[in-house]
């Protein structure tokens, strides 16, 4: 045997492969293959996991369809507010009926495998009246209907792109502010803490109307503001029509007055002008002339104790500053999917729109609450007017026309609530989108005649009002809820994929950037925004043409959630027992009288709370699903998926399955 020879004995040579490289022999151990039993076990395990999902899916589907069946069976055709139906609802129903008929015809032609692409004229079809009619419709559609729809869709696409460009410019401005860390700074020295007389006189107003869930926490938060007690006055402006609630609020005010807080209670017997009338009446008091600034908080807002110290100093050394607006923060943003989607919208509104417009233009729409006004700016602008339901935007526009500047402080946040039910949110959005169109009608002459620069006039008319308040709901509803399903039956005018997919997703990503934790809700947000377009469009039209529903003010329903830690206290706060104990504890004459009324009064008939059926949204759901079925016949791909999911989104909203659910 050679001296360099090594003898190797292989026990299982079938699992060894020999490789010869450069005269050397290497052994490569083969991987041990899985046995058939192991492979079968893995397959069975995966199959068991898949099968385990079926009962869960079946139970949830059964529960869902059971809820839908119960909701439809218990619905009242007359329970929905008439102003949310009307002519638009009838138009959608007619459009739906025509779409269903067209879908039946297309399905018939599809299964009959009619190939009429080579037929140019109806008379070329012989011995078939149905085919003759179908070819006649195809020719009429291509020659007359398609060009009209194409022109309309191109107009909406232009508006869509202009609005998207405006949104992109705003986001670039926000990026610049974040990059450079720009924010309003307080000029000059702050007030001397040891010398209370150096602090200016501040009036704090809390307008409310039947706010039984939140009056206590809002009054308590305002009364604890860190400001010299003799340098601010709290006005509780109660427009409640419930006598029992009036006594409770008055009793709450008296309790804080006994603690040394300078606070007064005001109640109007004639509730005219809604919130604007309430604020106007309060500003007419003789003692208001002694105050320099006024801070306004709606009944569900709870400012931090340092709110005035973070906002009022901005006025010092800035005589042309009329408003300091703070940001809203929401205690119930994670309560349900509806509040999460609202949080995305409002985060973008404050973080981008208000901050960018405030920094670069010194103008934005006053949010109606969580802001401090210079009283002289209010007086120079004509004070509160009752001509629209957006008195906050009205006074802001008039102050801007008079040369006053605004500041938005993004770092100062005030806790408040988001509507948790779709019914409350829909009514709020109706007022928020009809009011600006009312205001645009009445203030357009004043804008044109004002002495501000041409650029500021153009910004007010074309950007502030037309683009962001009129064009946005106009194209959103028309393009995605009417034209898109229509083009499924008129393929000659089909919308390109970038219009219905790529650009909307890009804009939604920009909208969601200020709330990065909400990125998992990107697609629900996009679908829900298109779903809300019907409400916003209807409100915009009613405000623009002065329809009856545009001038109705509905107070947004509150739940009274003071913070994330006390959600369970809502039931206790609403109970009559708590009210009685509170009154018994305070042995005042008004409290005893109130207690007697509580015992003597018969129990009121409480209307049972329940979720509703929204027929306009349901009609649009069936319209979009019908168009999705037509798109499936043509294998449109992305059009089909968009119409399918958007139709399901309308269906969920129409059945009131989003937001607060009532058992």
Image (cartoon, rainbow, N blue to C red):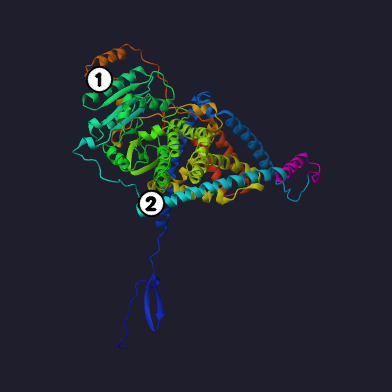
Observer-side mark, 2 or 1, equals 2
Q: Is residue 111 magenta?
A: no
Hey, which residue is sitting farthest top in the picture? 600
Instruction: Check disc 2 and report the residue beneath it.
Output: 177
Hey, which residue is sitting farthest left in the picture? 194
Q: Is residue 132 magenta?
A: yes
Q: Secondary structure at mark 1?
A: helix
Q: Give how far across and how far down residue 64 sits, in percent.
A: 46, 34
Quadrant where the N terminus sits is bottom left
One can see residue 648 in this view:
no
Q: Give how far across and how far down residue 324 sits, in percent.
A: 35, 40
Instruction: Check disc 1 and report the residue beneath it.
Output: 581
Q: Is residue 544 above or below residue 284?
A: below
Range of residues picked out in magenta: 122-142
Q: Give how far across and how far down residue 24 sits, in percent.
A: 37, 82
Q: Give how far across and how far down residue 504 sits, in percent.
A: 51, 48
Q: Secondary structure at mark 2?
A: helix
- Predominant secondary structure in magenta? helix
């Amino acid at each position: 045997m050679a001296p360099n020879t090594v003898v190797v004995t292989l026990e299982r040579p079938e699992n060894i492969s020999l490789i010869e490289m450069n005269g050397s022999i290497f052994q490569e151990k083969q991987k041990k293959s899985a046995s058939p039993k192991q492979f079968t076990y893995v397959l069975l395990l995966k199959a068991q996991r898949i099968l385990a999902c079926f009962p869960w899916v079946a139970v949830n589907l059964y529960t869902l369809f059971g809820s839908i069946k119960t909701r439809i069976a218990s619905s009242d055709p007359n329970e929905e507010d008439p102003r949310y139906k009307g002519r638009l609802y009838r138009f959608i129903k007619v459009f739906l009926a025509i779409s269903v008929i067209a879908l039946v015809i297309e399905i018939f032609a599809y299964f009959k495998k009619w190939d009429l692409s080579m037929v140019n004229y109806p008379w070329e079809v012989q011995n078939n009246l149905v085919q003759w009619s179908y070819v006649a419709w195809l020719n009429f559609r291509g020659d007359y209907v398609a060009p009209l729809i194409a022109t309309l869709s191109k107009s909406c696409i232009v508006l869509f792109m202009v609005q998207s460009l405006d949104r992109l410019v705003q986001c670039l401005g926000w990026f610049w502010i974040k990059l450079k860390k720009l924010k309003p700074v307080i000029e000059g020295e702050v007030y001397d803490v040891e010398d209370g007389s150096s602090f200016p006189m501040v009036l704090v107003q809390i307008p409310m109307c039947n706010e039984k869930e939140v009056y206590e926490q809002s009054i308590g938060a305002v009364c604890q503001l860190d400001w010299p007690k003799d340098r601010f006055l709290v006005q509780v402006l109660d427009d409640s029509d419930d006598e029992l609630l009036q006594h409770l609020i008055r009793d709450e005010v008296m309790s804080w007055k006994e603690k040394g807080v300078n606070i007064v209670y005001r109640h109007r017997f004639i509730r005219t002008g809604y919130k604007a009338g309430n604020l106007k009446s309060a500003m007419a008091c003789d003692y208001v002339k002694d105050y320099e600034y006024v801070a306004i908080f709606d009944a569900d807002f709870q400012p931090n104790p340092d709110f005035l110290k973070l906002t009022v100093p901005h006025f010092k050394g800035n005589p042309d500053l009329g408003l300091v607006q703070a940001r809203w923060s929401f205690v119930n943003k994670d309560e349900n999917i509806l509040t999460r989607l609202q949080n995305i919208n409002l985060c973008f509104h404050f973080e981008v729109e208000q901050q960018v417009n405030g920094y670069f233009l010194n103008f934005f729409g006053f949010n109606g609450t969580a802001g401090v006004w210079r009283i002289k700016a209010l007086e120079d602008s004509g004070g509160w007017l009752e001509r629209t339901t957006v008195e906050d935007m009205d006074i802001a526009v008039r102050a801007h026309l008079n040369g006053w500047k605004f500041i938005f402080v993004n770092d100062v946040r005030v806790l408040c609530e988001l509507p948790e039910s779709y019914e409350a949110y829909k009514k709020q959005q109706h007022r928020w989108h009809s009011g600006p169109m009312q205001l645009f009608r009445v203030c357009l002459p004043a804008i044109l005649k004002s002495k501000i620069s041409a650029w500021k006039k153009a910004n007010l008319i074309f950007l502030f009002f037309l683009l962001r308040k009129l064009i946005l709901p106009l194209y959103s509803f028309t393009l995605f809820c009417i034209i898109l399903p229509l083009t499924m039956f008129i393929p000659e005018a089909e919308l390109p994929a970038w219009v219905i997919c790529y650009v909307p997703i890009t804009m939604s990503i920009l909208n969601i950037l200020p709330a990065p934790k909400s990125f998992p809700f990107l697609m629900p947000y996009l679908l829900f925004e298109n779903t809300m377009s019907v409400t916003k469009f209807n409100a915009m039209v009613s405000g623009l043409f002065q329809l009856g529903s545009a001038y109705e003010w509905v107070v947004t329903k509150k739940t009274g959630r003071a913070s994330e830690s006390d959600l369970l206290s809502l039931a206790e706060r609403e109970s009559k027992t708590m009210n009685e104990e509170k009154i018994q504890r305070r042995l005042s004459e008004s409290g005893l009288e109130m207690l007697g009324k509580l015992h003597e009064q018969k129990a009121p008939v409480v209307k049972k709370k329940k979720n509703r059926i929204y027929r306009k949204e349901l009609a649009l759901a069936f319209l979009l699903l019908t168009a999705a079925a037509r798109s499936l016949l043509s294998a449109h791909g992305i059009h089909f998926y968009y119409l399918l999911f958007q139709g399901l989104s309308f269906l969920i909203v129409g059945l009131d399955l989003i937001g607060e659910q009532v058992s």
